[in-house]
Amino acid sequence: TQSTRRAKLMAEIHLHKPDILCVQQMEHYEAFFENEMHNQGYMMLYKQRTGTARDGVAICWLKDRYQLVLEHKVEFNNLAYVNPGNPASRRLLHDNVALIAVLEPL
């Protein structure tokens, strides 16, 4: 279940305390992870997938170790529409997203 998955993920994060963490298929961001990660000492970026999907991607970093310098959020569907004549563009139409973050050590 989702609650079991969340509990296991948080136990691993608490055990290893990574400086930087990237997560795919993150669900329940606002309802759970945002507050929980903040309580663990992390700042976060999050981007929900486009379309009807409820999950997304996140980048988390220890707020006492790094500061965010630059962020960029990518929606691959939008990239497909830039060059609609290219048959390869259809591969981008799956509601996928990405996050790019530049972090600077404190």
Image (spheres, rainbow, N blue to C red):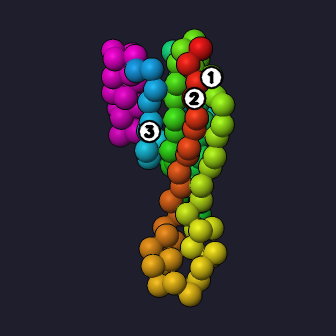
Q: Residue 80 colored magenta?
A: no
Q: Residue 14 colored magenta?
A: yes
Residue 13: horizontal and vertical position, in percent?
39, 22
Say what amino acid the circle numbered 1 marks. Answer: Gln
Residue 106 seen: yes
Residue 51, quarter of picture: bottom right
Quadrant showing the N terminus: top left
Say what amino acid the circle numbered 2 marks. Answer: Leu
Would you say the residues marked 1 and 3 are in contact, meaning their CB atoms lie under 8 Å apart? no
- Residue at coordinates 54% horizontally, 14% vertically from top-left? 65
Residue 43: horizontal and vertical position, in percent?
59, 24
The residue where tag 3 is placed is 23
- What separation in Å lies between label 2 and label 1 (alpha carbons)? 6 Å
**In the foreground, 9 or 93:** 93
**In the foreground, 75 or 106:** 106
- Residue at coordinates 50% horizontally, 44% vertically from top-left? 57
The residue where tag 1 is placed is 67
Residue 16: horizontal and vertical position, in percent?
34, 17
- Residue at coordinates 35% horizontally, 32% vertically from top-left? 4
Say what amino acid the circle numbered 3 marks. Answer: Val
Range of magenta residues: 1-17
Residue 3, quarter of picture: top left
The residue where tag 2 is placed is 103
